[in-house]
Amino acid sequence: MTSPYVRPDQIALAELERLLGHLTDELSAWRRRCQKAETALQALKEPGGMVPGDDVARTRRRMLDLERENLDLRVRVDRAREMVQRLQQRLDFLEDAQPLEAGR
């Protein structure tokens, strides 16, 4: 003969067992994702390593190269501007000195 008494902790234990099953599945999925990410990171760290879909990294490198080139060109333009200003000052000096020599 069975007892009609149901232990109150049985329901809670069944719920806990169900939740632990879901948690285990979720942790397994996260572990797989982490392993995949670590594999991709290792491939990037290797010399010449490329991971499929590296368009973003290539674009960033190109952007950095262009910014570096832009900075170099600005420096060159600034130097050229200074040289032109010095030449203009020399020309102004020569033009100012020319009437004095003509008047002698």
Image (cartoon, rainbow, N blue to C red):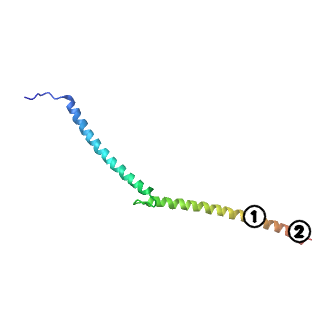
Check disc 1 and give the amino acid type: Arg
Q: In the displayed image of the protein, which residue is found farthest to the right?
A: 104
Furthest toward the front, the residue is 47
> Judging from the image, what secondary structure is the residue with disc 1 in?
helix
Expressed as whole percent of the image width and height from the top left, the position of residue 62 reads 51, 62
Q: Amino acid at mark 2?
A: Leu
Whole-percent x, y for residue 87 in the image: 75, 66
Mark 2 Cα-neighbour bin, 10 Å: few <14, some 14–19, many ≥20: few
Between the residue at mark 2 and the residue at mark 1, the CA separation in whole angstroms equals 22 Å
- Which residue occupies the foreground of this view, 63 or 42? 42
Q: Secondary structure at mark 2?
A: helix
Left or right position of 75 against 100: left
Quarter of the view holding residue 15: top left
Nearer the observer, 17 or 77: 17
Q: Is residue 38 above or below residue 68?
A: above
- Is residue 82 rendered to the left or right of residue 41? right
Return the residue found at the far left: 1
Q: Quadrant of residue 96?
A: bottom right
* Residue nearer the viewer, 73 or 27: 27
* Front tag of 2 and 1: 1
Which residue position holds label 1? 86
Where residue 100 is drawn, which disc sits there? Answer: 2
Is residue 13 found left or right of 66 in the rendered image? Answer: left
- Image quadrant occupied by the N terminus: top left
Q: Position of residue 63 (x, y in %)?
A: 52, 60
Q: Which of the 4 image quarters holds residue 77? A: bottom right
In the visual, does 47 lie left or right of 104?
Answer: left
Give the quarter of the figure containing the C terminus. bottom right
In percent of the image, x 79 and y 66: which residue is there? 90
Judge whether 61 appears above or below 13 on screen: below
Q: Residue at x 34, y 47 (%)?
A: 31
